[in-house]
Amino acid sequence: MAAELRFAKTHEWIRPDADGLATVGISAYAVEALTDLVFMQLPEVGRRVKAGESIGEIESVKAVSDFYAPVSGEVVAVNAALPDALETLGHDPYGAGWIVKLRPDDPADMAGLLTQPAYDALVKSGQH
Amino acid sequence: MDDLLETPLAGWHASHGGRMVDFAGWRMPVQYASIVDEHLATRRAAGMFDVSHMGRLEVGGRDAMPWLESLLTRRVEDIRPGQVRYTLVTTDEGPDGWTVLDDALVSRDADAGDGTPRFGLVVNASNKPRVMRWLERRLPPAGVALVDRTASTAMIAVQGPRAVEIVAGLCPASAAATVSGLGTYRCTTATVAGRPATVSRTGYTGEDGVELVVAADEAVATWDAILSAGTSLGLVPCGLGARDTLRLEAGMPLYGHELVETSDPFALGLGFAVTLDTPAHGSRAFPGATALRTRRDRSTGRVRVGLVVAGRRAAREGAAVARPGDPSATVGIVTSGSFCPSLGSAAAQALVDRDVAAAGTPLEVLVRDAALPAVVTPLPFVRRGSRP
């Protein structure tokens, strides 16, 4: 069974992996809204992050946007190939376009994030 | 965005995927799909831009010519019908003895039926209210008529190597020849897609092209006709995002960024737009001319340069410029910067100290946690007719 995606209001997704880690990326909506991506700054592996803390930036032609840790934990891996292939975010935002893997301090924190239907409703309402 | 002004094309933009933003008080499309794609289409074929937010002022009456001559930094008395010039609008206020209110295009249209000259001024949307106030304060009791035509007209820029061909193809044969043969910084009137238009061989992209002014209620039909005729040749509608990256690469200043009230035009490379002396009449006397003459002879401050920035990460407006390895000693500031699609890297315009302004000088731009390597590069970054 595919693990369920959860979303932060700031447009990151997180998915628990089988090994106790969690994979994090940004939503297809966010990629579409940003468009024209030109640069991405990844966090360092080993960094301790708090939920809501900026852990990197994504830059489009028009603007620089932060992306945030959806839950607290430790960065255990980053998708090092991604900054040189930002188009991957458009093609496969929930797969090959993953950004970091975290070891959540408390996996239960993920349950406090938005479900896919709740996130979709948020985007649709324009309250983002 | 409820109180924003709208151009006659706002509905078209919104219904064709335009991402509408507040630009200088106007609801304008920043892009339709991709800024990069729109930018590259303009360089390769053609882009069409709604620039109806720009202020369009008409100056007529028997004293229109001497009045404008007394107010603009470019000469007006020797402009012939059908000529366009880039000028600054200055006042004699401010700590240095001048203030740059705006940069503008002044054009001389065909004379009125009674032989009086008629002029047009295109000013920045953000500056139009204060330019109007400044001009109205200086109107003589009679002899000059100043009319704001912004709301009653629309302005469409068609830019790129195929632009003139596309627009000329919508004109009757004689007008098509006139439009095709129109020189750079020349204007004429022509029937375009069956509607009367003013056609200027001007633009803000660095490419060949024209800017059309049509009646507001003809704007959508004209836009649709150009799109229909141009799509098969590669023309795409473009938003203001691509307009900004195109003008950045073309080395053109943007008011509010490179050019501000206190700017020294000579340090910005805009000395060509400040005519202080004329062969026949000696010194000119537009507002601020005396102080600007003094500055021309002793222009000492930071100068405008181009910076090609290593990588794709933008050096944006406000970022400090430093000598390599010496981030504490700031030698300049970025005035505009972006990833530049035709360069494939980031680039910027910046104001820097004169001792680091020579082409080839290595510098660094400080962004957040990084120092981006940059090299002083002559403007424009991209020359007309290059086909990236």
Image (spheres, rainbow, N blue to C red):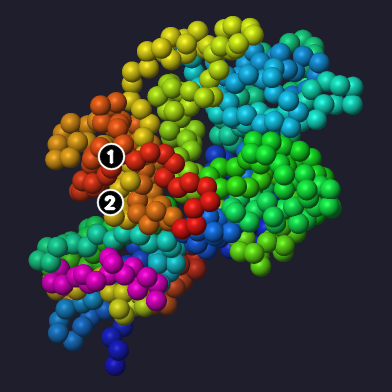
Q: Secondary structure at mark 1?
A: loop
What residue is shown at x 49% (from left), y 18% (from top)?
A: B99
Answer left or right for A122 relative to B115: left
The stretch of residues the image draws in magenta is A75-91
Q: CA distance from mark 1 to mark 2?
A: 13 Å
Same chain letter for marks 1 and 2: yes
User: Does A83 appear in magenta?
Assistant: yes
Q: Above or below — where is B335 with respect to B68?
A: below
What residue is shown at x 81% (from left), y 16% (from top)?
A: B62
Q: Which residue is mark 2?
A: B310
Q: Earlier in the sequence, mark 1 or mark 2?
A: 2
**In the rendering, at what x and y percent does residue B366 appear?**
24, 42
Q: Which residue is mark 1?
A: B360
Front position in the image: B183 or B110: B183
Does the rendering let one see residue B368? no
Does the rendering let one see residue B185? yes
What chain letter is assigned to the residue under label 2? B
What chain letter is assigned to the residue under label 1? B
- Mark 1 vs mark 2, foreground winner is 1
Q: Above or below — where is B244 with respect to B36?
A: above
Answer left or right for B285 relative to A85: right
Residue at the farthest bottom position: A1
**In the rendering, at what x and y percent does residue B224 appear?**
73, 59
Q: Secondary structure at mark 2?
A: loop
Quadrant location of residue B131? top right
Answer left or right for B159 relative to A80: right
Quadrant location of residue B161? bottom right
